Structures are given as C-alpha cells and as structure tokens.
C-alpha cells in the first residue's frame, strides 16, 4: 500500500507540473490580441511556443523516467536495497579516508639529524610519489592524507591536518600499495628518490629507511581535524 501511494503521488505530481506549464503557455497566447499583431510577430510567437512545447515534452519524459526508476526501486527487495546502500556508503567512506584500513604496504621513516629541521618539501615529495605509484591510502605520523591535507613548515614545527609536529622528530609515512609490485618496482623507485634527496640536500643529514610491512595500518581521518569540516560546503543544485 505504501509503495502504491508513493507511486500515485509521484505520477500526480508529474501530471500537475505538466498541466501547469501548458496552462501558463496557453495563457500567454490568450492574453494578446491577435488582431493587433502583425504576421511576423505571430510567426515568431509560434516558433517560441514550439520550442517551449519541445522542452515540456523533454521534461515530461524525464519525469516519467524518474518515476519508473523509483517504481523499480520500490518493487525490489527492501533488504537487498538497504544492504546495497550500506555497502555503497561504506565504500565511499573508505575512499574518503573516514575508515581505518590495513593491508600490505610500505613504511618510510625519515629524520634530519644534522640541523634537526625536517623539510616539509621532503615529506610532500614522498607523499606525492606514493600517490603517483598508486597508493590507495597514505598517512603521515598517523594523520590520514585526504584531498585537503596540508603539509607545511612553520618555524620549528611541521603542521599536518592542523596537527603540530616537532621538525626535529622522526616522521613515519605509511602507504598501502599493490603488493605484487612492491619488490620489483616500488621499492627500487623509492630508493632512487631517497638517493636524489641525499644528493640534492647534501649539506643536511637525512636518515631515510624504506621497508615493506605485511600489515600496514592506516587510521581514519579524525573528526576533530580541519580537513573533516564540511559546514561551509553547499551542494550545487
């Protein structure tokens, strides 16, 4: 009964909208005095109403398509539909960095031991290279990398997701990547980046360790982080 009521309401709404649009169009024709208009104006008006009629037909078709979609959803197994929605929600939550995840991956430990000032550019370079290698999840010192994550230096501090870290401390970058390519491609490539940094920043002393771990745990983005905030975002209609 509930499904029938929803279907009836939707069809009634579509009919009312279509009827209202047609009525408004006809009203526009009746309000003018045909005898006071010249032939060219009438021709232009006919063309205009033909275009409006085509638009109404297209909108009507879209409404009926949407109604058909809702009907098919209502007629389906409600438990199966709910399970599918929950699975989709969980999949997008994982993609957005809102769930803890774990799998085979790499851990990169970095520390600048001479001056005690880790460069934010070095952290960003490794994070960017991991993303280019196809990392499906990345964290820096337990902070989940998402689209709005910032990695920046400020005096003696490195700020990640609004969290402050001492530049003299060690930093752990963790990433989950394709296991089959770790030994053959990923590790050699990351090792080349390590050597490049050591060469480019020879006046500093970077200790960089790169290793594979069978169970890399990457935490979800904390709800307290700035990157989690959505209160200023308005969807485009």
Image (cartoon, rainbow, N blue to C red):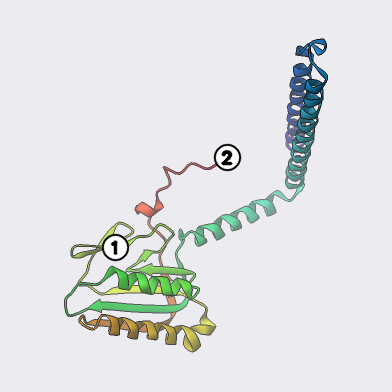
**How dense is the environment of label 2, judged by Cα within 10 Å: few (below 14), some, or many (20 and up)?**
few
Vertical position of residue 114 compared to residue 217: above or below: below
Residue corresponding to mark 2: 237
**How dense is the environment of label 1, judged by Cα within 10 Å: few (below 14), some, or many (20 and up)?**
some
Q: Specify the quadrant of the image occupied by residue 55.
A: top right
Task: Name the residue at the left extreme.
Answer: 115
Tell which of 233 and 96 is nearer to you.
233
Question: How many numbered circles are shown?
Answer: 2
Q: Residue at x 54, y 84 (%)?
A: 180
Please state if 126 lies on the left or on the right of 115 as rendered. Answer: right
Q: Specify the quadrant of the image occupied by residue 175.
A: bottom left
Q: Residue at x 81, y 30 (%)?
A: 50
Per the image, label 1 sits on a secondary structure element best described as strand
Quarter that holds the C terminus: top right
Please state if 47 lies on the left or on the right of 143 as rendered. Answer: right
Vertical position of residue 7 compared to residue 72: above or below: above
Position in image of residue 77 (x %, y %): 73, 51
Position in image of residue 32 (x %, y %): 76, 13
Quarter that holds the N terminus: top right
Q: CA distance from mark 2 to mark 1?
A: 35 Å
Vertical position of residue 82 compared to residue 209: above or below: above
Tell which of 141 and 198 is nearer to you.
198
Position in image of residue 235 (x %, y %): 52, 43
Residue corresponding to mark 1: 152
Q: Residue at x 40, y 52 (%)?
A: 228
Kindly identify which numbered label has been placed on residue 89: none
Position in image of residue 93 (x %, y %): 51, 57
Q: Are dots 2 and 1 in contact, CB under 8 Å?
A: no
Please state if 38 lies on the left or on the right of 96 as rendered. Answer: right
Vertical position of residue 149 compared to residue 169: above or below: above
Q: Specify the quadrant of the image occupied by residue 109.
A: bottom left
Per the image, label 2 sits on a secondary structure element best described as loop
């Amino acid at each position: 009964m509930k499904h029938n009521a929803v279907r009836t309401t939707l069809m009634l709404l579509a009919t009312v909208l279509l009827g209202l649009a047609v009525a408004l169009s006809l009203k526009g024709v009746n309000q003018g005095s045909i005898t006071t208009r010249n032939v060219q104006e009438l021709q232009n008006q006919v063309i205009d109403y033909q275009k409006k009629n085509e638009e109404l037909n297209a909108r009507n078709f879209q409404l009926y398509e949407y109604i058909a979609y809702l009907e098919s959803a209502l007629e389906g197994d409600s438990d199966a539909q709910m399970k599918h929605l929950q699975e989709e929600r969980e999949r997008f939550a994982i993609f957005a960095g809102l769930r803890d995840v774990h799998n085979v991956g790499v851990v990169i430990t970095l520390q600048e031991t001479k001056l005690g000032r880790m460069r934010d550019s070095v952290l960003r370079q490794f994070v960017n290279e991991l993303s280019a290698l196809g990392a499906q999840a990345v964290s820096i010192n337990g902070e989940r990398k998402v689209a709005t994550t910032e990695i920046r230096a400020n005096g003696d501090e490195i700020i990640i997701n609004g969290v402050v870290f001492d530049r003299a401390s060690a930093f752990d970058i963790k990433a989950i990547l394709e296991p089959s390519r770790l030994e053959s491609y990923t590790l050699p490539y990351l090792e080349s980046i390590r050597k490049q940094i050591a060469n480019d920043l020879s006046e500093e002393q970077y200790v960089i360790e790169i290793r594979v771990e069978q169970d890399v745990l990457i935490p979800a983005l904390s709800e307290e982080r700035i990157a989690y905030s959505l209160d200023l975002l308005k969807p485009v209609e």
